[in-house]
Amino acid sequence: MGGRGFGVMLLDHLWYVVEKFDLEFTLFVGACEKTIQYLCDTVSGFQIKKIELDYPVSDDEIVSRTEVALQSDSRIKLVLMDAITSLPGVHFPWEQVCELCRQHNVYSLVDAAHAVTQIPVDVSKTQPDFFVSNLHKWSYVPRGCALLYVRRHLQRLLHCIPIGHGYVSASHPFVPSPVQTSPEGQWVTEHEWAGTIDWSGYLSVDTAFEFIANCGGGEKIREYCHGLAVQGGDRAAEILGTEVLKCPGSEYTANMVNVRLPLDVPSERSGTHLEELAAQREMLFDSLFERDCFPYPFVMTRRGKREWWCRFSAQVYVDLGDFEIAAKMLKEICETLQGIDFSMVIKKQNDQKVAEEMENMALDPEASYKN
């Protein structure tokens, strides 16, 4: 649902800006890259400038590199950023970057999928132009449920996807709407009813926020989860014999922590590197699912080298023992996978595929001609 809100902003707002304000560049740091690629493919004149982040990178460096980009290219009209990146799961200096955007008269769009409840959010203070966050990730609401915030003077640029019953036409303003205008205004009304959807997530928000209050409030939850993430990350790294992703001077860990796995990525010098990595990833995930264990492994480039890491999430229903169980399972799985030659796995798969094709051709001599 956060992705839908993100799409509403980009597919509507940026298209409008391209046509009306000669938008040429979007600067993005992490965030929803596929939508950006789609716009490059479909919108004439749409271009991007990406800041590649090789973690660990400090908040100061991220802000500095963003400022250099804005100073060096006046064509940039919008900066897209994360509030908390997903892989690795680290806090991003979005508040400072939003301030930079205001200084340079550039739109700010915050992909805050992991933000609400995990970190304090005050949009009246930070003043992003566009902000979208999921509630089903950290606010105890069923999937999918998200919120969309747009500064009031920019709301005229955005419309619901698909166009809903609450839309009021500028060219035919006298066509009546079947939807009663919301007390929050016409823009909210337009987004309230956009076809048949499952309302259960939205109807659960009040109850979820009551649960948060009963836990002592968002700050109390953050205090517990952050402390557990720090302690659990250190303990997992101790069990795995590795390390936690850190950067001096920056607070990466909110309620998620990233721990390196004792598992080598298949050699990039191999001609079947990508196939080997895919096979290794599949075995790793299958092994975790078989054990009902769900930390999230991922490959990250650090200082020019690709490495396996794992994102652990702390929650109110998790304790240190859960981190220990997951780390021990991961250690066992990694020890098994480390001894596998994945180039031979791929060769065996390819040989089997050729054998099956030969068998099919033997059963159907005309198959080769059909292909």
Image (tube, helix red, strand yellow):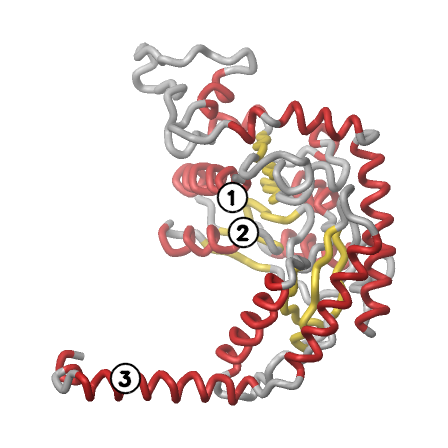
The kind of residue tagged 2 is Cys
Residue 352, labelled with which disc? none
Q: Amino acid at mark 1?
A: Gly
**Residue at point 32%, 10% (across, down):** 174
Q: Is residue 316 visible?
A: yes
In this view, the residue in front, 310 or 14, is 310
Secondary structure found at label 3:
helix
Pick whichever, 168 or 116, lies toward us.
Answer: 116
- The circle drawn on residue 32 is 2
**Disc 1 and disc 3: Cα gap in Å?**
41 Å
Mark 2 to mark 1 CA distance (whole Å): 8 Å
Q: Earlier in the sequence, mark 1 or mark 3?
A: 1
Nearest to viewer (mark 2 / mark 1)? 1
The percent coordinates of residue 332 (x first, y second) are: 72, 74
Q: Residue at x 33, y 11 (%)?
A: 176
- As shown in the figure, which amino acid type bears the numbered disc 3? Glu
Q: Quadrant of the C terminus?
A: bottom left
Mark 1, residue position: 3
Real-space CA distance between mark 2 and mark 3, rounded to the nearest whole angstrom: 40 Å
Residue 298: quadrant of the picture: bottom right
Q: Position of residue 138 (x, y in %)?
A: 68, 40
Closest to the observer: 286 or 137?
A: 286
188 with respect to 213 (left or right): left
Q: Can you tell which quarter of the image residue 166 is in?
A: top left
Q: 108 or 236: nearer the eye?
A: 236
Q: What residue is shown with label 3?
A: 357
